[in-house]
Image (tube, grey):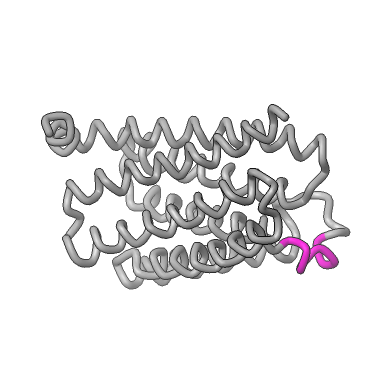
Amino acid sequence: MEWYNLLVQNKDLIKIIYGAIISLICFTIVLKSDRLYRLSLHNGIRYFRNAFFFYSLAFVVRYILGYFFYSYGLTLLFEFFLITAGFFLLHSLLWKNFYYIEKPYLSSLFSPVTILFYLMAGLLVFLDYLWCFYLFLFLSQIFIFISASIISYRNYISNRNKAFPRFYFLAMLLSLFAWILNILAAMVFDWHKGIMINAYLLNIIVFILFLFGVIKIANR
């Protein structure tokens, strides 16, 4: 397939295009979900919005700023934002269990629970810095998306007539597969370009699926 070989041969250019696409999708999701939150005041949507805020920061830092001004500090910042986004995404499914703690706090970005996210993300980034590898990033994301897949599947079973739980479960499952593919590319295939392109394509599909679900609800 000529188009596939072209992607593999132009990986650096593909990275910045990939980062721009994901960042734009995330920014759109943030705007759409913020509007939904203001209409519904549903806290799950609020934390969902926060997750994609951090995803957008992560991809801008890694694939756009990092393309023009690469530094190891930006790589660490990318990992911090990515892990934090994962925590917020999982929290969007579990927020009811912690609402009694967070209710007095006006900001969804600063509460005892969210500060714990930042501390945990910082610790994992520090451990990876010492390890000189993304081991704890990979482990944290596998844990997050296995947990999120199980919870979102239960939500889907309980709400079969609603569209978003189905999209959410599918997106979580595909996210898990994408992270497994990333781990295989890094630990087994030494960042093989072809496998990384497949991971990029799968990630784009996942984020488009999230966007489609948000737009579908927003247009009701």
Q: Height in image: 85 above or below 219?
A: below
Which residue in the rendered view is the most extreme toward the front? 161
Q: Residue at x 48, y 70 (%)?
A: 143
Which residue in the rendered view is the most extreme toward the right?
A: 104
Q: Residue at x 72, y 30 (%)?
A: 220
| Residue 133 vs residue 72, the one in the foreground | 133
Q: 35 left or right of 84? A: right
**Does residue 8 sit above or below 170 in this rendering?**
above
Q: Is residue 171 magenta?
A: no
Q: Main secondary structure of the magenta part?
A: helix
Residue 161, image x, y percentages: 69, 48
Residue 44 in the image: state x and y as whole percent.
72, 52
Magenta stretch bounds: 95-102
- Residue drawn at 59 percent across, 35 percent down: 29
Quadrant of the rendering where the N terminus is positioned: top left
Q: Report whether 2 appears left or right of 156.
A: left
Residue 74 x %, y %: 39, 48
Q: How many marks?
A: 0
Measured as percent of width and height from the top left, residue 2 is found at 11, 30
Identity of the residue drawn at 24% across and 31% down: 13
Q: Quadrant of residue 112?
A: bottom right
- Left or right: where does residue 180 sit relative to residue 24? left
